[in-house]
Amino acid sequence: MTLKGERMQQARQTAVTDPAVFGKVAVLMGGWSAERDVSLRSGAAVLAALQAQQVNAHGIDADRQVLNVLVAGKFDRVFIVLHGRGGEDGVIQGALEILGLPYTGSGVMASALGMDKLRTKQLWLGIGLPTPPYRVATRLDDLSAAARDLGLPLAVKPSREGSSIGISRVDKLDQLSTAWESAAACNSPVLVEPWVQGEEYTGAVLQDEALPLIRLETPRLFYDYQAKYHANDTRYLCPCGLPQAREAELRDLVRRAYAAVGGYGWGRVDVLVDAQERPWLLEVNTVPGMTDHSLVPMAARAVGLTFEQLVWRILETSLSRAD
């Protein structure tokens, strides 16, 4: 084992028994993205879990003055629970690098890539990982061309939003205009893909380990914002029902897809499996939700980790970042 590896192992072992090793921890939540409300709920859950384990953690509703707050508060590290732009796209990560504050989760490059569905797809395609073909629309007329090229139904989505915000399914040509307005309103390039019919799975990654897959089922048209955070009729199946060998293959695909963007510490990858049993990677989440409806905590429970233990494990990863 290298010297750095020994220090990482020692830090993790110390942290397991001594919350003081973390020092003063800022839990960043809220922010200014379209996912602010979800982030506040995630952050509150994380903060409560840390404080229950005697970690000196403090919640901060991040605004444009957040760096001044961190400096004035003399924090030792940051637990990032900011979803979407400003928190999941490399912006806060870069600022924390300048301040020299260790933080949880992926670094600047991986965060920026993961937030951008278009760049993520281009990277996956470049290394031969399966993801649906796509077109980029800069105007409404481009959607019509994409429909001719890719066929219907289509998925029309903003390339730099999360939580299914701005996503539409287009089954008929007369739905293109509404789909365009919804996606273009998010002020990011509009990504167009064939709508893959099949089973939807999500795979969490924790400290380089792909956790058990979760199969998602909803009576809604698709697993949208309402299904993710509010609906009580969404089903989460873990075990996911796949044969053991098949699930192992998909978990390995999740791990490779996350590693490809440079993901670190923890995250989540969404996958569709079509009627021919072909997997299609959809997107990466480098700061997944941590609410009572969230998926990473569900996957962690499948391997015997409570929510408090999961949060602790995530915070542990910030110790190695200090090296």
Image: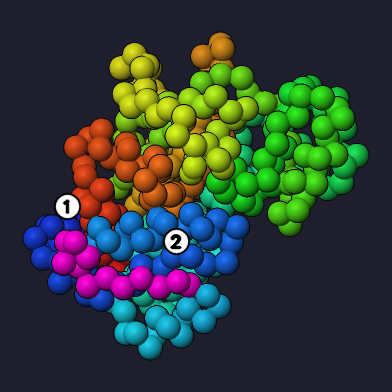
Q: Farthest residue to the left: give it.
A: 17
Q: Farthest residue to the front: give it.
A: 232
Mark 2, residue position: 40
The mark nearer the N terminus, 2 or 1, is 1
Alpha-carbon neighbours of circle 1 within 10 Å: few (<14), some, or many (≥20)?
Answer: few
Q: Is residue 320 left or right of residue 293?
A: left
Colour scheme employed for the rendering of this structure? rainbow
Q: Are marks 2 and 1 in contact (CB under 8 Å)?
A: no
Q: Is residue 15 left or right of residue 187?
A: left
Q: Residue at x 71, y 54 (%)?
A: 186
Q: Is 260 rendered above or below residue 302?
A: below
Mark 1, residue position: 1
Is 55 magenta? The answer is yes
Alpha-carbon neighbours of circle 2 within 10 Å: few (<14), some, or many (≥20)?
Answer: many
Q: Residue at x 80, y 46 (%)?
A: 181
Measure how far apart labels 2 and 1 are at the Cα level: 40 Å
Is 236 magenta? The answer is no
Residue 79 occupies quadrant: bottom left
Q: Is residue 45 left or right of residue 11?
A: right
Label 2 secondary element? helix
